[in-house]
Image (cartoon, rainbow, N blue to C red):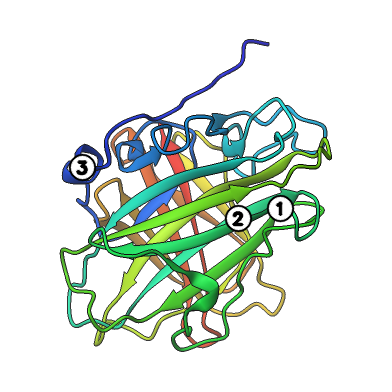
Amino acid sequence: MKQFLLTITLTLTAAITTFGQKGFDFFSFDDTTGLKCLYIDTIVYSQNIWQIGKPQKTIFTYAYSVPNAIVTDTLNSYPINDTSSFIIAHIVHYPEGNSGNTIVGRYFVNSDTLSDYGTIAYSLNNGQWINLDTVTPAWWTPDLPVLTGNSNGWKDFHFCFWDGVIHNGDTLRYRFMFYSDNIQTNKDGLMFDDLYFDDISEGIEEPCCNLISSKAFPNPAYDNLNVGFENKNNSTYKLALLDNMGKIVKTLPDIKSNTVKVNIKELSSGIYYYKLTNTFDKKYAIGRFLKQ
């Protein structure tokens, strides 16, 4: 099978100046839309091993949202003495007030515990890098990723923080690093999928903080879309469909099952997102689908 590989080598300045149309950003790595704000740093780290593509390794054999994820090499074990980095730039969009910023995603790790590991940090307007595990979370208990050892499958993570100096229109950069020591372990490393960045504003609605699993099918979809999600207690959810600019194009309230069917025949072809929210239990889900 021909290997699909995409490595972005744009300058970061160019990456962020053409970006920031919608208030949230979602990356499933399955198309090039939005990847202009993703930067795989091959200047500082000339041997950078982050790649976007289909995982075809010993342990890493599938993305969370098939076919692609961002992986420490889609084919090979990670090397010794490695330092690799990719950066995602997010333009802050507060419709009203300034309450916080959130990062959500999925990860899969297979590495030598503690010796080989990943980190996530943020930087405001090209300022200093601040590791998320040193930041006091806002509102709720975070679910930070454990980016070393063996996760034994895909895991969710979420983190919300508040920094009083962040304002509407600022640029938040998120840096994802991977490090290895001088001992070869022949392990697969680290990969991420379905990364979601959003800004939470005062006066809009109380934020939902607990990510639940969900899946849109069929994907691509034609006339009808199904969204399945965790809802063991038949709680009430609201579904919103958003276009690629973040505009809500359809809503469905009072969903109490674990699957909802939506007629999307009237929507134009293109990329869309779904958001499920349960403000009472403070749970939510987000995903992407293609309308054909």
Question: Does residue 267 appear left or right of residue 146 in this picture?
Answer: left
Q: Secondary structure at mark 3?
A: helix
Q: Are marks 2 and 3 in contact (CB under 8 Å)?
A: no
What crowding class fits label 1: few (fewer than 14 Cα within 10 Å), some (14-19), or many (20 or more)?
A: some
Residue type indicated by callout 3:
Thr
Disc number placed over residue 106 in the picture, else none: 2
Q: Quadrant of the N terminus?
A: top right
Q: Residues within 10 Å of mark 2 (few under 14, many from 20)?
A: many
For this view, does 38 lie left or right of residue 57?
A: left
- Residue drawn at x 46%, y 83% is 279
Q: Position of residue 285 (x, y in %)?
A: 52, 64
Give residue 154's mark: 1
- Closest to the observer: 286 or 164? 164
- Residue drawn at x 46%, y 52% is 262
Image coordinates of residue 172 in percent, x first then y, are 30, 61
Mark closest to the chain's N terminus, 2 or 3: 3
- Where in the figure is residue 216, as x and y percent of width and height? 55, 48
Q: Nearer the viewer, residue 202 or 133?
A: 133
> Disc 2 to disc 1, how far (Cα)?
6 Å
How many marks do you count on the picture? 3
Q: Earlier in the sequence, mark 1 or mark 3?
A: 3
Residue 32 position (above or below residue 238): above
Q: Residues within 10 Å of mark 3 (few under 14, many from 20)?
A: few
Give the distance between the C-alpha atoms of the residues marked 1 and 3, in whole angstroms.
32 Å
Kind of residue at badge 1: Trp
Cα gap from disc 2 to disc 3, whole angstroms: 27 Å
Secondary structure at numbered mark 1: loop
Q: Which residue is mark 3?
A: 13
Kind of residue sitting beneath label 2: Arg
The answer to whether 278 is drawn above or below residue 80 in the figure is below
> Which residue is depicted at the point 36% across and 37% down?
35
**Callout 1 touching callout 3 (CB < 8 Å):** no
